[in-house]
Image (cartoon, rainbow, N blue to C red):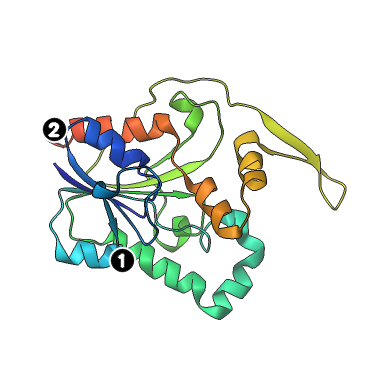
């Protein structure tokens, strides 16, 4: 199968698809960090979609302007047009002329602006001890089946500026500490967990020829 993994610089899903023998390519404006530049298209994904034919697309559109975790910035993003641009980009991905499409994003405004996701998953349902609520919108693909349910992982507990007790997943806290710039922080936070990447690659390609 010829598969486009859109907005993926890590190549996590692309590598798993390649292991299964598929002609998969990651595509992002950033250079890839997965170690296989020959499998990476560093270009505007919308141009790639229009120019070439694909059997499937697994997409990870930017969530900075869409996720509810950044709701405190929504007013500014609406005023400067960045949120509307992100919505339009998301919908161009969703409406692409590709028979099988999966779109991944955190909980955000697309659930109300467009439609509710077909499935909501967590890394701990696929063998990784971590919590990251992840929404999937699917076209022509089945919901992912859980592969290995494990513990939810560690949490970093802290007191907010308002004196409230808070906690965040430890992997997220470490990403905040490791990143030196906002761009690096976004990249580290958006990486796909290994168990989910394997499940996407194996389950969606196995079911592609099954009758709906």
Report if the CB atoms under discs 2 and 1 are less than 8 Å apart. Answer: no
Indicate the quadrant containing the N terminus: top left, top right, bottom left or bottom right. Answer: top left
Residue at point 81% right, 48% down?
160
Residue at 48% over, 57% down = 63
Q: Position of residue 143 (x, y in %)?
A: 32, 36
Residue 171 image offset from top left, x and y in percent: 60, 36
Q: SS class of the residue under badge 2?
A: loop
List the residue tagged with mark 1: 44
Image quarter hosting the C terminus? top left
Instruction: Using the image as rendered, state which of residue 88 and residue 189 is in the foreground.
Output: 189
Give the side of residue 16 with respect to residue 206, left or right: right
Q: Element under label 1?
A: loop
Any part of residue 144 in sight: no
Residue 25 visible:
yes
| Label 1, residues with CA under 10 Å away: few <14, some 14-19, many ≥20 | some
Which quadrant of the view contains residue 31? bottom left
Left or right, 82 with reference to 2: right
Image position, residue 107 (x, y; %): 51, 50
Residue 18 appears left or right of 144: left
At a point 30% along the width and 37% down the height, the residue shown is: 15
Q: Considering only order in the chain, which callout, 1 or 2, is on the residue closer to the N terminus?
A: 1
Res. 113 image quadrant: bottom left
Q: Is residue 182 above or below residue 21?
A: below
The residue labelled by disc 2 is 210
Which residue is at the far right? 163
Question: At x 60% / y 59%, what residue is drawn?
Answer: 182
């Amino acid at each position: 199968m010829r598969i486009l993994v859109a907005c993926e610089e890590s190549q996590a899903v692309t590598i798993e698809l390649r292991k299964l023998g598929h002609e998969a390519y990651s595509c992002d404006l950033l250079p890839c960090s997965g170690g296989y530049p020959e499998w990476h298209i560093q270009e505007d994904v919308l141009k790639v979609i229009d120019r070439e034919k694909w059997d499937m697309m697994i997409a990870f559109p930017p969530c900075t302007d869409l996720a509810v975790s950044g709701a405190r910035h929504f007013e500014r993003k609406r005023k400067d047009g960045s949120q509307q641009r992100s919505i339009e980009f998301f919908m161009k991905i969703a409406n692409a002329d590709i028979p099988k499409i999966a779109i991944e994003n955190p909980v955000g405004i697309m659930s109300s602006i467009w439609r509710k996701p077909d499935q909501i998953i967590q890394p701990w349902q696929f063998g990784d001890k971590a919590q990251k609520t992840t929404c999937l919108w699917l076209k022509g693909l089945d919901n992912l089946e859980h592969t290995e349910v494990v513990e939810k992982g560690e949490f970093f507990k802290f007191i907010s500026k308002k004196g409230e007790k808070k906690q965040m997943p430890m992997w997220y806290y470490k990403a905040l500490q490791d990143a030196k710039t906002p761009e690096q922080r976004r990249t580290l936070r958006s990486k796909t967990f290994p168990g989910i990447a394997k499940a996407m690659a194996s389950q969606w390609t196995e079911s592609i020829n099954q009758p709906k």
